[in-house]
Image: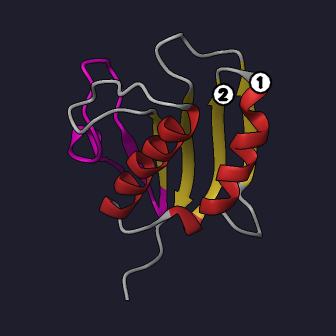
Amino acid sequence: MIEYRGNSVGAGSPLPFSPATVVGNLIFVSGQASTDQGGAIVADSFEGEFRRSIENLRRILREAGTDLHQAVQIRAYVRDAMQLGLYNQLYREYFAEPYPARTTLTGCLPDSIQFEIDCVAVIPPAV
């Protein structure tokens, strides 16, 4: 059975996608960027945008009954490859070994954002 969480999980968007979709015990979270609760982009330093994006991801995961430590796959998008060192440093603050499978792409974001992240995470059974 597929359960769609749609705009009830995470910041909504006028675009045709759900912030997160739950299938079985997995949650697939669409790309999260540095946005406020209304979905407006919040420009900041790379670190500020990274942290806000991670917190947006964390909020969606928590609403579904899971958290970052249950992430099994991460895809990250970094506008400027010069930020990869800082990206890896900050990433280690939020994810620990064994790290999720990860793909990182650079040079693929518009000028309006510096970082975006999506993930697949396990939702543990309710105790």
Q: Looking at this view, name the residue that lies furthest to the bottom.
A: 127
The colour scheme used here is secondary structure
**Residue 1 visible in the shown view:** no
**Between 79 and 26, which is closer to the camera in this rendering?**
79
**Between 62 and 115, which is closer to the camera in this rendering?**
115
- Residue at the image position 64 percent from the left and 36 percent from the top: 76
Residue placed under numbered mark 1 in the picture:
81
Disc 1 crowd rating (10 Å Cα; few below 14, some 14-19, many 20+) is few
The amino acid pointed to by label 2 is: Val
**Between 8 and 82, which is closer to the camera in this rendering?**
82
Quarter-wise, where is residue 103 in the image?
top right
Residue 127 in the image: state x and y as whole percent.
37, 89
**Residue 44 visible in the shown view:** yes
The answer to whether mark 1 and mark 2 are in CB contact below 8 A is yes
Check residue 11 for magenta coloring. Answer: yes
Q: In the picture provided, is 60 more to the left or to the right than 110?
A: left
Q: In the picture provided, is 91 more to the left or to the right than 85?
A: left
Please provide the residue range marked out in magenta.
Answer: 1-26
